[in-house]
Image (cartoon, rainbow, N blue to C red):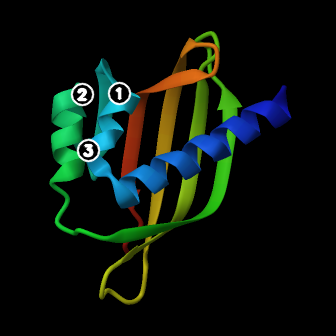
């Protein structure tokens, strides 16, 4: 069970970052009206507002490099909490920006999840 949760958490983080890096509007499929994102301390709720925030980020191209992914089961049946740390390379920016991100995703149907909670924070010193 633990290995499966780790594999699902890693696969989700990889998928999320690939979509964020390449097709941000498609991220809307990962959220529901009850979903909440805290982005750099700002709380945003609902599919439309979260998608608007993510699609309005002030850069066109970015590349995520994941350093660590830690996952554990949540109290929601089939839910998983995932903590990600890594770096974000923006076009023309050097060095990369370090970030931390937490997801709590919940199972809708066998093998399908949506993001219930997400927290994103740059690790700037």
Secondary structure type for disc 3: helix
| Rendering quarter of residue 50 | top left
- Residue contact between numbered discs 2 and 3, judged by CB atoms under 8 Å: no
Which one is closest to the eye, mark 1 or mark 3? Answer: 3
Of labels 1 and 3, earlier in sequence is: 3
* Residue at left offset 43%, top offset 70%: 63
1 on left or right of 79: right
How far apart are the alpha carbons under marks 2 and 1? Answer: 5 Å
Secondary structure type for disc 2: helix
Instruction: Look at mark 3 in the image and give the residue it sits on.
Output: 25
| Rendering quarter of residue 30 | top left
Residue in front for this viewpoint, 116 or 14: 14
Residue 90 percent coordinates (x, y)? 34, 76
Numbered mark located on residue 31 in the image: 1
Where does the N terminus fall, quadrant-wise? top right
| Dot 3 crowding, Cα within 10 Å, few <14, some 14–19, many 20+ | some
Give above or below for 74 relative to 84: above
Of labels 2 and 1, earlier in sequence is: 1
Instruction: Look at mark 2 in the image and give the residue it sits on.
Output: 47
Residue 54 percent coordinates (x, y)? 24, 49
* Residue at left offset 16%, top offset 34%: 49
């Amino acid at each position: 069970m633990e290995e499966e949760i780790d594999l699902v958490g890693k696969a989700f983080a990889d998928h999320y970052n690939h979509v964020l890096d390449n097709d941000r509007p498609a991220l809307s499929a990962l959220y529901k009206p009850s979903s909440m994102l805290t982005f750099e301390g700002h709380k945003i709720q609902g599919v439309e507002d979260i998608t608007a925030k993510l699609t309005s980020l002030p850069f066109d191209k970015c590349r995520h490099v994941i350093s660590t992914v830690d996952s554990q089961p949540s109290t929601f049946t089939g839910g998983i909490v995932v903590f990600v740390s890594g770096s974000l390379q923006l076009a023309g920016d050097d060095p990369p920006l370090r970030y931390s991100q937490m997801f709590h995703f919940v199972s809708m149907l066998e093998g399908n999840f949506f993001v219930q909670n997400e927290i994103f924070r740059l690790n700037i010193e």
